[in-house]
Amino acid sequence: MDKLDVPTIPEGYALTLGFACLLDICSSVELNILAEPADPDQDSTELHKAMITSSWCGALASLSLLLEARSVTPYVLIVTVN
């Protein structure tokens, strides 16, 4: 391979990356909701509801776009298992 040749990106790499990012976003929202509050006297239920309300629509839209791709199923399984 010459220095000027552009390396090829494996098929499905973008889908795998997109799905991994979506999983990380959902995991971070879950961790924030399950974490102990810094101030035990403060009720964080409203904050948790706001986090879920503001994030579920984007997560659902992103997941539906990823699942519409024809070759996403094997890559989704690989990312989920790893």
Image (spheres, grey):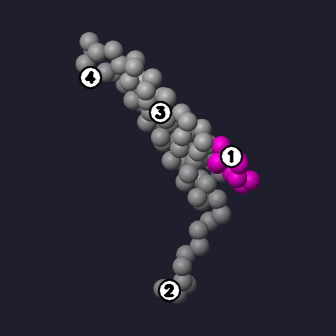
Along the line of sight, which residue is nearer the eye, 35 or 79?
35
Marks 4 and 2 sit apart, C-alpha to C-alpha, by 53 Å
Quick one: label 4 or label 2, which is nearer the N terminus? 2
- Identify the disc placed on residue 4: 2
Counting labels gives 4
Quick one: label 1 or label 3, which is nearer the N terminus? 3
Q: Is residue 61 at least partly visible in the picture?
A: yes
Secondary structure of the residue carrying numbered label 4 = loop
Q: Residue at x 43, y 36 (%)?
A: 28
Where is residue 52 shown, x and y percent of the image?
48, 28
**Foreground label between 4 and 3:** 3
Quick one: label 3 or label 2, which is nearer the N terminus? 2
Q: Is residue 30 at least partly visible in the picture?
A: no
* Bounds of the magenta segment: 64-73
Marks 4 and 1 sit apart, C-alpha to C-alpha, by 38 Å
**Foreground label between 4 and 2:** 4
Secondary structure of the residue carrying numbered label 2 = loop
Q: Residues within 10 Å of mark 3 (few under 14, many from 20)?
A: few
Kind of residue at badge 1:
Leu
Kind of residue at badge 3:
Ser
Where is residue 45 shown, x and y percent of the image?
40, 17
Along the line of sight, which residue is nearer the eye, 74 or 55?
55
For label 3, the residue is: 54
Residue 12, quarter of the rendered image: bottom right
- Identify the disc placed on residue 38: 4
**Foreground label between 2 and 1:** 1
Quick one: label 4 or label 3, which is nearer the N terminus? 4
Q: Is residue 30 left or right of residue 67?
A: left
Quarter of the image for the N terminus: give it: bottom right
Where is residue 61 shown, x and y percent of the image?
60, 42
Compared to residue 28, the image places residue 46 above or below, namely above
For label 1, the residue is: 67
